[in-house]
C-alpha cells in the first residue's frame, strides 16, 4: 500500500509530466482535420477534451466559418491570422483543389477574399510536415433525412449531398490518418441514392483505401443517442469509426469503450435553460428600430438570448397549447387544433413545447424558419426558444459567439454536433489510441 508521501510524490510527478517540467515531455496531443466543420461543435468537443489539436477546419458557408474563426481566437488563443489560415472557406466537392491547391479562377473569385493566401495552396500546404492523426466530420445530413424523402420523392437520386461522403473519402486517402469519425443521421442507414445503399457505398469506398469500418449490416449498431452523453436532448446519430489497417487498436476497442462511458445522470431541458433570464410578452407589440417586438428580456446582456417576434395570435396559441397540456394530444387532435387556429390544412403536427423535466427533441436547422416546434416550456413566457437556449440544448458553452443573422444562427446550431457528445467521442478515441 502506498503511504501518503509516496502518493503525493507520484501525483506531483504526473503533474510535472503533463506540464513538461524537469525535462519531461508533455502528454501527446493528436492532430485532426474537421470536414464539414459548420460552426465548430465537433471541433470544440475534441479540443475541450484536451487531447486533440485542430490543424484545419473546412466549411463552405461564410457565417459558420466566421463563427469558428472567432471561437479559435477568443477561446483557443489562436491569432487572427492563424484562425483565418486554419478555417478554410471552400466547397469540398472541389476536392483536389482543396487538398493540393492550384485554385481555378472561379474558386479564387468565389472564395479568395474570405481566405488566407495559404488556403489557395491547399490543405497539404497548410498542414505542412505535421502528422494528421484523425479526420472528423459529417456530410450535411438533410439529404439522408427520412422527412426530406417523404416530401421530395426524387431527393435520393437528385440531391448532390448524398455523394459528399466521396469527398470525405478522398481527404482521408490523401492524409492517411490513424482513424476517422463520420457522424450522420439514422436516415443514412436506409438511404439509397441512385438505387444503391449508401452504407454499402461508404463501406466499399473506405475499404478500397485501406480502412476498416463496420460491415454494412452492422452500421445500425453504431447508432448512439447524445442524451446518453450529457446532452439534454434526444438526438440519435450514426457514429461511424474507420481505422487504418495495421493500427494497434480496433473498432471493438472504440465501440466498447464508448458504450461503457454513457453518463450515469442524464440532463434535461431545465438543466440547459432553466437558469437563463426569463423573457415575457409585452402588453402590445412595439415597434423598435423599425422591427416589431413582442417580448421583453429581463436581462439583455446576452445578445443571443433575445426574443423572437410572435404575433398576438401566436402568443395566445402558445399559452393555450402549454396550459392545456396539448403535447400529449394525438396527431389528429394536433392537426385539428392547427386548422381551428389558422383555417389551414396540414398533414403534420405544427406545435410542440419543450418540457422542463424531459430531454428536448432533436434540435434542427428548421429553427431558422420558425420556432413552433420549440416552444419554451413556461406558459407565462409564451414564446419560442432563443438562439442561446438552442445553443445550450446543444451544450455549446455560454461564451460561444455565433456570427450571422438570427436565421443563420439557428441553422448553424441545428446542424452542429452537440459539444458534450463530441467530447465523449474524443475521450474514447484518445483512450484507445494512446
Image (cartoon, rainbow, N blue to C red):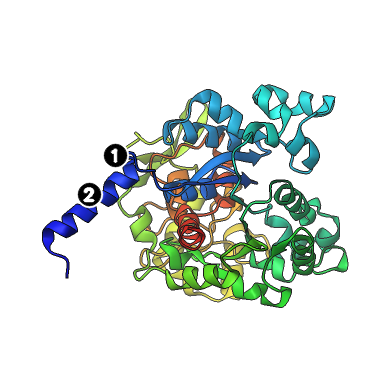
Query: Which residue is at a point 74% across and 55% down the rendered structure image?
Result: 165
Query: Which residue is at a point 22% across and 49% down the rendered structure image?
Result: 12
Q: Choose between 100 and 305: the one closer to the eye.
A: 100
Residue under label 2, please give it: 12
Is 167 situated left or right of 300 in this image? Answer: right
Is 173 situated left or right of 330 in this image? Answer: right
Residue under label 1, please give it: 22
Q: Around disc 2, counting alpha carbons within 10 Å, would you say few (fewer than 14), some (14 to 19), or many (20 or more)?
A: few
Mark closest to the chain's N terminus, 2 or 1: 2
Query: Is residue 39 shown above or below 126?
Result: below
**Total marks in image:** 2
Secondary structure at numbered mark 1: loop
Q: Around disc 1, counting alpha carbons within 10 Å, would you say few (fewer than 14), some (14 to 19), or many (20 or more)?
A: few
For the residues labelled 2 and 1, the Cα–Cα distance comes to 11 Å
Look at the image and tell me whether residue 347 can be seen.
Answer: no
Which is closer to the viewer, label 2 or label 1? 1
Q: Position of residue 365 (x, y in %)?
A: 60, 51
Q: Position of residue 324 (x, y in %)?
A: 42, 69
Look at the image and tell me whether residue 46 can be seen.
Answer: yes
Decide: marks 2, 1 in contact (CB < 8 A)? no
Query: Which residue is at a point 76% across and 52% down the rendered structure image?
Result: 161
Secondary structure at numbered mark 2: helix
Q: Quadrant of residue 1?
A: bottom left
Query: Is residue 421 shown above or below 307?
Result: below
Q: Position of residue 130 (x, y in %)?
A: 59, 38
Hey, which residue is sitting farthest front in the picture? 23
Q: Choose between 383 and 173: the one closer to the eye.
A: 173
Is 23 situated left or right of 261 in this image? Answer: left
Q: Choose between 402 and 427: the one closer to the eye.
A: 427
Query: Which residue is at a point 73% across and 57% down the rendered structure image?
Result: 143
Amino acid at each position: 500500500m502506498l503511504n501518503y508521501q509516496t502518493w503525493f510524490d507520484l501525483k506531483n510527478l504526473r503533474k510535472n509530466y503533463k506540464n513538461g517540467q524537469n525535462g519531461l515531455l508533455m502528454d501527446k496531443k493528436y492532430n485532426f482535420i474537421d470536414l464539414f466543420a459548420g460552426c465548430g461543435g465537433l471541433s470544440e468537443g475534441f479540443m475541450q477534451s484536451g487531447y486533440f489539436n485542430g490543424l484545419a477546419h473546412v466549411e463552405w458557408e461564410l457565417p459558420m466559418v466566421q463563427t469558428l474563426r472567432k471561437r479559435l481566437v477568443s477561446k483557443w488563443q489562436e491569432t487572427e491570422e492563424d484562425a483565418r489560415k486554419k478555417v478554410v472557406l471552400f466547397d469540398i466537392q472541389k476536392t483536389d483543389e482543396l487538398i493540393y491547391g492550384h485554385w481555378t479562377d472561379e474558386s479564387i473569385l468565389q472564395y479568395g477574399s474570405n481566405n488566407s493566401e495559404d488556403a489557395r495552396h491547399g490543405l497539404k500546404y497548410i498542414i505542412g510536415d505535421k502528422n494528421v492523426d484523425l479526420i472528423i466530420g459529417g456530410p450535411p445530413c438533410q439529404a439522408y433525412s427520412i422527412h426530406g424523402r417523404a416530401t421530395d420523392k426524387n431527393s435520393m437520386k437528385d440531391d448532390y449531398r448524398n455523394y459528399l461522403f466521396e469527398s470525405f473519402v478522398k481527404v482521408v486517402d490523401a492524409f492517411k490518418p490513424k482513424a476517422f469519425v463520420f457522424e450522420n443521421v439514422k436516415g443514412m442507414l436506409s438511404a439509397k441514392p441512385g438505387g444503391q445503399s449508401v452504407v454499402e457505398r461508404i463501406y466499399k469506398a473506405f475499404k478500397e483505401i485501406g480502412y476498416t469500418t463496420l460491415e454494412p449490416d452492422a452500421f445500425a449498431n453504431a447508432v448512439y443517442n447524445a442524451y446518453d452523453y450529457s446532452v439534454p436532448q434526444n438526438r440519435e446519430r450514426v457514429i461511424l469509426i474507420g481505422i487504418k489497417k495495421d493500427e494497434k487498436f480496433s473498432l471493438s476497442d472504440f465501440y466498447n469503450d464508448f458504450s461503457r462511458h454513457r453518463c450515469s445522470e442524464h440532463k434535461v431541458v431545465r438543466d440547459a435553460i432553466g437558469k437563463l433570464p426569463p423573457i415575457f410578452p409585452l402588453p402590445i407589440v412595439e415597434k423598435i428600430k423599425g422591427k416589431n417586438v413582442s417580448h421583453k428580456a429581463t436581462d439583455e446582456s446576452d445578445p443571443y438570448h433575445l426574443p423572437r417576434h410572435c404575433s398576438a395570435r401566436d402568443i395566445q396559441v402558445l399559452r393555450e397549447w402549454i396550459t392545456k397540456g396539448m403535447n400529449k394530444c394525438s396527431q389528429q387532435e394536433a392537426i385539428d387544433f392547427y386548422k381551428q387556429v389558422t383555417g389551414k390544412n396540414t398533414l403534420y403536427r405544427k406545435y410542440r413545447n419543450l418540457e422542463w423535466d424531459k430531454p428536448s427533441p432533436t434540435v434542427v436547422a428548421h429553427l431558422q424558419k420558425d420556432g413552433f416546434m420549440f416552444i419554451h416550456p413556461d406558459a407565462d413566457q409564451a414564446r419560442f426558444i432563443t438562439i442561446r437556449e438552442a445553443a445550450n440544448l446543444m451544450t455549446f458553452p455560454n461564451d460561444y459567439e455565433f456570427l450571422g443573422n438570427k436565421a443563420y444562427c439557428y441553422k448553424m446550431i441545428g446542424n452542429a454536433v452537440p459539444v458534450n457528445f463530441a467530447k465523449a467521442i474524443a475521450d474514447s478515441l484518445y483512450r484507445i489510441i494512446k
